[in-house]
Amino acid sequence: MIQKDSVYHRMGQNWSYAYDEATLHIRLRTGRGNVARVDLVHGDKYGWDHTHGVQPMELLASDAQYDYWQAAVQPKYRRLAYYFALHNEDEALYYLEKGFFDAPPAIIYEGLFDFPFLNREDVHLMPEWVKDAVFYQIFPERFANGDPSLSPENAEPWGGVPTPRNFFGGDLQGVLEHLDYLNALGINAIYFTPVFEATTNHKYDTRDYFKVDPHFGTNASLKKLVDACHERGIRVLLDGVFNHCGYTFPPYVDVMENGQASKYANWFHVRDWPPRVEDGIPTYDTFAFEPIMPKFNTENPEVREYLLSVGRYWIQEVGIDGWRLDVANEVSHSFWREFRKAVKESNPDAFIVGEIMHDALPWLTGDQFDAVMNYPLLNLALNFFARGTTDSKQFSEAISGMLARYPQQITESAFNLLDSHDTERFLTHCGGDVRRLRLALLYLMTFQGTPCIYYGDEIGMEGAYDPDNRRCMEWNPDRQDQELLAFYRWAISLRKAYPALRGSRIRFRELPGEPALLAYDRWDEQEHLLIVMNSSAAPVKGALPAAEDASDWVDVQSGERCSVSGGKLSFSLPAFGFMVLRRE
């Protein structure tokens, strides 16, 4: 019997939305394995008789509890009224906005789900370049020292032990001098943590939003770097710290000097005057409880306009390609709506990424961010690839649920990462086992969304939580893991070689009795790939159903054809081994 309490749909959000200017995606949730087939019955509400049709829905994904179905519809008149017909072998149930029924609706205009009109300006379109991007995150103070004359007087020798407050002299010239390295790696986009003037090594305590930190260079040197990146086909994202500033930010200095009489008194959230710290807790709102990072009052029109002008300035004057937004979930939605408008008016192709570590759908409806940093994916990868605390079934089900949580264009452009300046390095989570990191990277490069590599991961750098995860980049080839570097280059080239790996089609295959084996298909209209991984420390033999001819599957690494016998594709993988197959 169909479980009515598992069935869910609503108009809007990730259930009924415009995928592009002509296409609607309609989704339905049912109990896992409870419904054999779902048809979408749809038409124009003003002309049902001559527009209605029945469209089978595709099984999009399945998590531990539910199946998620999807249909792509292109309504001729951009309006769509619809209902669902759920089928089992001997049962049919019809689901309308007004409820469940045993027969199709007799009065077609009453109680159907309704997508009133596909307004093109409401469509959440992503910058086209994002799907093809492979990002590299750079912490400027620790990447390379290209101009020692810029280094702080107390800078320590390169490669020393990082602390919360020490400096090593990394700068923008150092990045410029290593663009050949990034090109060889396959990188075509860079995300920089903050580069604006500040007092700390991380620069999240901004002093001047319109000035590059003198220890990094000048505004002109940033412009030179951005231009050089663009000449090489590399896009550039800067880190926007608009939730808070630093304690040396001139308006905040004025507040500290003049108290409530300051003309900037309403730029911040002061709970009790004068601003001070009592028992370790500031009497003003800050980032976390950091007294040196007072929080902006973005309800103040002057603050708003100031920060919006920052967002416009670096796009218009320096030519950056977008923003990564720090502590994005603690800033008001109304501010981000204005920010998006300002940025997109300056460059419609700009990419806006928010730092949000939880369910971010309220920020991803087309009026605020293009994407968020995909920390949920990072955590799933940690549990499966690094820690081994989940099996392949649990991993694939969790990933499937994540894919159903957002509109398709969101998952296609998600900012996917294995680690960052805010996390322990992935290889450290793996206990230094490079084989586990290789599998996780391969998954990142063969999964939908935009991958981002944290500087130094590709050469085997490790690091515990901040500050240890912010070590100096190792440039001595003898101290780099050259085999790992070669693997990174190969995995990135694999992603670039097959458009199907950058698309949205993915299907996990079940391998009962093999909890360490992860298998999934990636395909589009032109090509089909199958990836199989062994996440265990022991060799594994397995078999997958394969209706295709034996000559159809080719290993992309070796070029060898794979044997199919008795409708099964048999394989043997070493410990932490993998295979990537292409169907010819």
Image: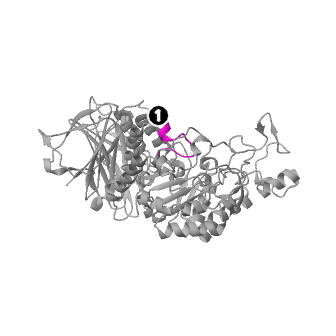
Q: Can see residue 552? A: yes
Question: Which element carries disc 1, helix, strand or loop?
Answer: loop
Q: In this picture, is 518 found above or below 337?
A: above
The N terminus sits in image quarter:
top left
Q: What's the residue type where badge 1 is placed?
A: Gly
Asked whether residue 8 appears in the rendered view, the answer is no
| Residue 327 locus on image (x, y percent) | 62, 48
Q: Is residue 435 above or below residue 229?
A: above
User: Which quadrant of the view contains residue 262?
Assistant: bottom right
Q: Quadrant of residue 392?
A: top left
Image coords of residue 20 (percent x, y): 40, 61
Q: Is residue 223 above or below residue 502?
A: below
Pinpoint residue 87: horizontal percent, then vertical percent: 25, 40
Residue of label 1: 431
State the extent of the magenta-drawn residues as a range. 416-429
Taking 265 as reference, is 531 left or right?
A: left
What x and y, as percent, mark residue 88? 24, 37
